[in-house]
Amino acid sequence: MAGLPPAGPSGGHLEEGSSSRWRSRRDGPPTYHRDVLTRWMERIFDDQLAPARFVVLSVLALGDLRLLHRPEDPWDWALALGALAVCLAGCRAPLAAAVTLSALLVSGDLLGAHVGVPLKAMIAVSLFELALRTSGRRLAAGIGVTTVLLTLHALNAASAQVLPTLYRLSILAGLPLLFGAYVRLMRENARQARERVCEEERRRRSETLAARAAERTAIARELHDLVAHHVSSMVLRVGVARHVLTDVDPRMTEVLDDLHGSGAAALADLRRLVALLRDPAQVHDDPAVSLVEPAGLVEALEAALERGRQTGLTVSADVDPAIGGLDAVRGLTILRLTQEGMANVARHAGPAASARFSVRLDGDTVRLEIVDDGGRPDPAAAGVGATVRSGGHGLIGMTERAQLLGGRLAAGPVPGGRGWRLLAELPSGTAPSDGPVAAPGTDAVAGPAPQAPALATFSAPPPERPLGTLDRGGPLGGPGR
């Protein structure tokens, strides 16, 4: 029918609420309003605010005595002031206050005092506090004693008539007790709901950690049984070739030695990675498990650049010695970005390319830059285009690594010429950053953004990837940039 909103699954029409979501009209009042009411009632009727509530009540009662029901007899003033004193003390002992005020009300009837209205208000608030803050035998005893005293007052006021007596008793005692019990029940339900939410969050977190641990163990098993097996076989065969081929060109011997050393280092890294996957706590408990030490970062970078030179690249380096003070996590990230960046230069620009590498500590920001000259064009890639180099997970993995530390990574063609430029900025961790640390997959950056509009900033995929996927930001991270 035209003009009507769509029907919900329960048959009732749907309307758009304040949360911009469709809900059924048959579902009752919005949960949002109930939650707001519960929070306000918890704040107003909190036990810590009981003194403030009794002070407000005493001020109102004193104003009533001064302006509306001004006592004329000295006994009336004595009774009223005594009730005020009991009311002020009732914030700590609502049971004693309710019983004492009820006794004063009956005494006022016997003495012919005319302070019943403010005294009844004090009794009602005391009974409310009694039902709100006590339970069990104390509550039952308080209700019993005050009911007897208030019944005597109601019988005297109603001339011993049953229905008027019950009516006065229900107004004076029943309503405050019911309201106090209702507020107490709401507070208890809210507390239990919060506990259930916290327990569910703890359970979900525990299940997530267990699932991640199981997946890490499975990945570590595959790395150990499959990848490490093949790498160790290659290292063994290269070692055999070094000893069997004795009368070959010395350059070939040098290549075999380099292959053997690289394979042995890769195998050692794989074993350490398997250990970290099986027990991530080792990275904090055992510094020897870390893949790079802070003091050895400069040497590790030089080794990575030298490996690039051995492939035929011409590499000029500008390494700031101050980066040796970075922590192990940032040092490892810098090393992995360097290794992947140099591998991309050799892969896409060719072994005859020239590259300029620089890493500097600029205030609270570590700035890493790799620029190549494009090398010699590859005829096989002539139809691909010179502005985009993709096809693997290298850039995605490097971007993830940078964003995990609150930094950024950008890559793209060099403006106005041939070549490719990789730029990464990371917070050094030695000084507070200017902005919040970004989570993986966000756009926040630490420190000022570089003035390189021609560079394309690559956004990493969402951090919560399906179990079974690897962070491909390291040397094993896919064939493309």
Image (tube, grey):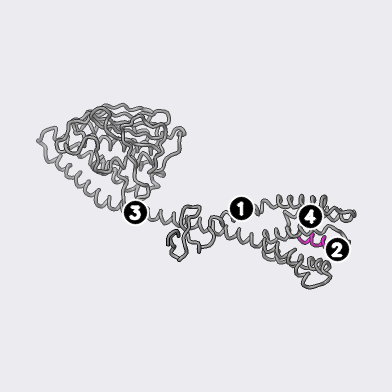
Disc 4 from disc 1: Cα separation: 28 Å
Examine the structure image and report whether residue 223 is included in the region drawn in magenta. no
Q: Which mark is residue 40?
A: 1
Name the outermost residue toward the bottom: 162
- Which image quarter is the N terminus in? bottom left
Callout 3 environment at 10 Å: few (<14), some (14 to 19), or many (20+)? some
| Quadrant of residue 283 within the rendered picture | top left
Three-letter amino acid code at disc 3? Glu
Foreground residue among 396 and 92: 396
Q: Residue 313: x and y, percent?
A: 21, 30
Disc 4 from disc 2: Cα separation: 18 Å
Disc 2: which residue:
109
| Quadrant of residue 166 within the rendered picture | bottom right
Horizontally, residue 369 falls left or right of residue 124, namely left
Nearer-N-terminus badge (3/1): 1
Foreground residue among 83 and 292: 83
Disc 4: which residue:
86
Examine the structure image and report whether residue 105 is included in the region drawn in magenta. yes
Q: Are marks 4 and 2 in contact (CB under 8 Å)?
A: no
Disc 3: which residue:
215
